[in-house]
Image (cartoon, rainbow, N blue to C red):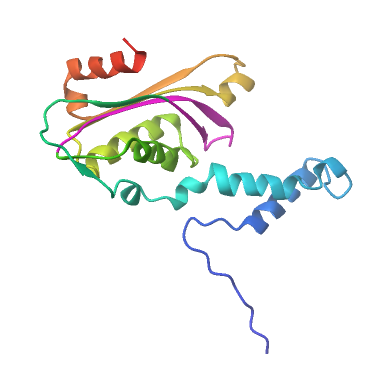
Amino acid sequence: MAHKVTTRRTPGSPAVPEMADAVRAFLRAAGLDPARNPELAQTPALVAGAWADEFLDGYRLDPRAILAERMPVAQSGQELVVLSRLSFTSVCPHHLLPYGGRAHIAYVPSRQVVGFGQVVRLLDCFAHRLILQEDLARSIAGVLVRILKARGAGVVLEAEQVCLALRGGRRRGSRVTCEAWAGSLRLDGELRQRFLGAARGD
C-alpha cells in the first residue's frame, strides 16, 4: 500500500502553493475566475508570494536572534538612543488591510546597545505580521526592555490605516498615532518629552 508523503513545515513557515490555491478559490467565489481572465492568471501565485515573503515573514524572525549581537557601553544613565522617521508597513488582523507610516523608537541602554540596523529589523519582525498598531508599539517596547535589558523604551507609531480611509468613515489622509512606554520611559515624563522632541526634530 502506498504511503502518503507529507511535507513537514517549521512553525510559521508558509505553504505557498496552498496559499495560491486559496487566493484562486477566493477570486472564483467573488465571480472572477483566473482560468478565464488572462489578467488574473498569475494573480494567485503573485499574491501568495507577496504575503509569504513580505507581509508575513515576521513570523519567521526571532527577536532574540535579532538582538543577539551587542556592544558594551562605558556608562549607563538616562542617555537616549533614538531612531526616528522609520518607514514601516503592516497588516491589520481584522480586515487584512494594510497600514503604514513612520515609527519613532527610543531606548535607554543599561549595559549594552545594539546596531541601528538591528532596531530596524526588530521593527520589521513585528510589523510583518498580522498585528494591531497598538500591539505593534507595545511589542517593540517590551522586547527592548525584556530582551535587551534596556532601562526604558518608547515607541510612537504614526500610520495611515487603509480600513479607516476606505471603509466605514472613509477619512482619507487621516492618521492614527499609538504610543507605548516601558521601564523608565513609562515613569519619567521629562525623559518622554526628550524622546518626543527628538522624534519631532526639535
Residue 138 among magenta residues: no
Total residue callouts: 0
Farthest-out residue, top: 202
Answer left or right for 101 relative to 40. left
Which residue corresponds to the image point at 33% horizontal and 33% vertical from the top-left?
Answer: 138
Give the position of the N terminus as an image quadrant. Answer: bottom right
**Picture quadrant where residue 184 is located:** top left
Answer left or right for 77 relative to 95. left
Q: Position of residue 201 (x, y in %)?
A: 34, 13
Q: Position of residue 18 (x, y in %)?
A: 66, 57
Most common secondary structure along the magenta stretch: strand
Residue range (magenta): 86-110
Farthest-out residue, right: 36
Q: Nearer the viewer, residue 167 or 63?
A: 63
Quick check: 27 above or below 81?
below
Give the position of the C terminus as an image quadrant. Answer: top left
Q: Nearer the viewer, residue 82 or 89?
A: 82
Q: Position of residue 82 (x, y in %)?
A: 29, 25
Which residue corresponds to the image point at 84% horizontal and 46% vertical from the top-left?
Answer: 33
Quick check: 28 above or below 132?
below
Answer left or right for 56 relative to 46. left
Residue 87 among magenta residues: yes
Quick check: 88 above or below 52?
above
Q: Position of residue 25 (x, y in %)?
A: 74, 50
